[in-house]
Amino acid sequence: MKKATTPELSKSRYLYGLRCPKYLWLETWRKKLRNEYDEPTEEILAQGYRVGALARKLFPGGIEIPYNGFSMDEQQKQTLEALKHSKVIYEASFQYNGVFVTADILRKVRGGWELYEVKSSSKPEDSHYDDLAVQYHVITNAGIQVSKTHLVHINTSYQRKGALDPSQLFIVVNLTDDVKERQASVKKQIAAQKKILAGAEPDVPIGAYCYQKYECPFTSHCWQHVPDKGSVFDLAGQGVNQYQLFHEGIKKLKDIPLDRLKGKQRQQAEATRKKQTIINKEGLQEFLDRLRYPLCYLDFETFMEAVPSYDGQSPYQQMPFQFSLHIQKKPGGKLHHHEYLAPPCVDPRKGFLDELLRVLPEDGCVMVYYMPFEKGRLEELAKRYPRKNKQIQGVINNMVDLLEPFKARHLYSWKQEGSHSLKAVLPAFVKDLSYDDLEIGDGGGAMQAYHEMCALVDSPEKLATLRQHLLAYCRQDTLAMVKLLEVLFERT
Ligand code: SF4
């Protein structure tokens, strides 16, 4: 191995640079400009750690090169030692020509080493090829013979039975040929990125890459010139390219020439200009005619995890842990509320299903918002508990989707900004109910809170408070449906 020097690039920075040169530059020289809200949650970090630790079990008995508190030079020194006498190394560190990389797993084989990169994703993605390609470039040029490069990713078909089985939880894909093919471009890209780092902040226009897969952590810096409200990026759905419009100087939705828009995008732009509410009374009536009492407004909350905790659970399966149900027996009648929130750290499915089937009237019209979600969870529960299948199918057959009239724009307000989500529709039509005062404001927050409950089992007061926040959030979702249906009745 060559003598270490202070690196200009790392594997992560290289990948940022592939996405956007300005991202690389800002991450290196102006990290303080990062968005305030871009820190990954503890749960995401813990999940990545769990996945990494389990993947190591595919290649047990290795030596880990520690990185916390160690300089890059020290990490490389320890790697050099480990290469002499270990057959498996975790977090081996290398540097070549100013680029520093750390390999998740290296395994010694006849004629060299095999390289394994572990990801929590369910399939190979383009960035994984680039990730392995830059590692291969650095490690081979540092003097190590790499015979194969692999991606280790999550197998979503795996279903846990008893103890976790890493050989089933992961899929190992050999990407050696693709990685080798990318070598020439890696070399060119590294040279280009070094030039970028040596220069001033690159002038890069905003583009689709700002939100590619995840939001870039520098959007608050780069998107300052985009109007907060009413920009062309509020235009929803497929059709015109908003970035093209923006770069032509058309920054506001109201300034887009209408002849450049079609279908729902045009309808949105027109409604926004006129501050209009669109009503199709016939369409609304058709929807309302399908309803019958008792009306049961139902909403589920779920969590998912890369590493399944319970038997019969698959990676990234949506696991229902909470529901809220408002029942109305006759038009304008009193609301009866039922709710369920599973205790922390247990498989929530059985308790959830038993309680749901206990409180849900068999003949009820089950109103949900975006039916594929609740229906999908019920179908999964029917497979898990086949004896309840008949009852569950009855619930599914009674379902009506409140999203339908809003998606079809039988009722549409310009205030929805083209979105049909419950969180966009509610404030457009209902003034006295809002998510703003709630501690938990969306499904992601509910999932996080449920995970947090596990850590609070020894703090009953905090646990009780968190439970109240979760119950209040889910209750709000079904109450929002109640209010929106009232609006539909008023508008027909
Ligand atoms: S916000 Fe967009 S333009 Fe700015 S650094 Fe990120 S990807 Fe590049």
Image (cartoon, rainbow, N blue to C red):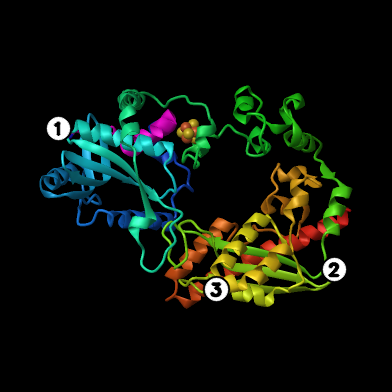
Q: Left or right of 447: which side holds 119?
A: left
The residue indicated by pointer 1 is 2
> Can you tell which of label 1 and label 3 is closer to the viewer?
3
Indicate if the residue with disc 1 has its beta carbon within 8 Å of ligand 1. Answer: no
Q: Residues within 10 Å of mark 1 (few under 14, many from 20)?
A: few
Element on which disc 3 rests = helix
Q: Please state which of residues 388 and 58 is positioned toward the viewer in this rendering.
A: 388
Q: Please state which of residues 366 and 278 is positioned toward the viewer in this rendering.
A: 366
* Label of residue 350 in the image: 3
Hey, what amino acid is under mark 1?
Answer: Lys
Give the alpha-carbon distance from disc 2 to disc 1, as whole Å: 79 Å
Q: Residues within 10 Å of mark 3 (few under 14, many from 20)?
A: some
Of label 1 and label 3, which has the lower sequence position?
1
Element on which disc 1 rests = loop
Query: Toward which corner of the image does residue 362 lie, by quadrant?
Result: bottom right
Tell me residue 373's x, y (percent). 62, 57
- Asked if 366 appears above or below 239 in the picture, the reply is below
Q: Left or right of 231: which side holds 310?
A: left
Q: Please state which of residues 402 and 489 is positioned toward the viewer in this rendering.
A: 402
* Res. 30 visible in picture: no
- Asked if 270 appears above or below 390 in the picture, the reply is above
The residue indicated by pointer 2 is 332
Tell me residue 265's x, y (percent). 72, 35
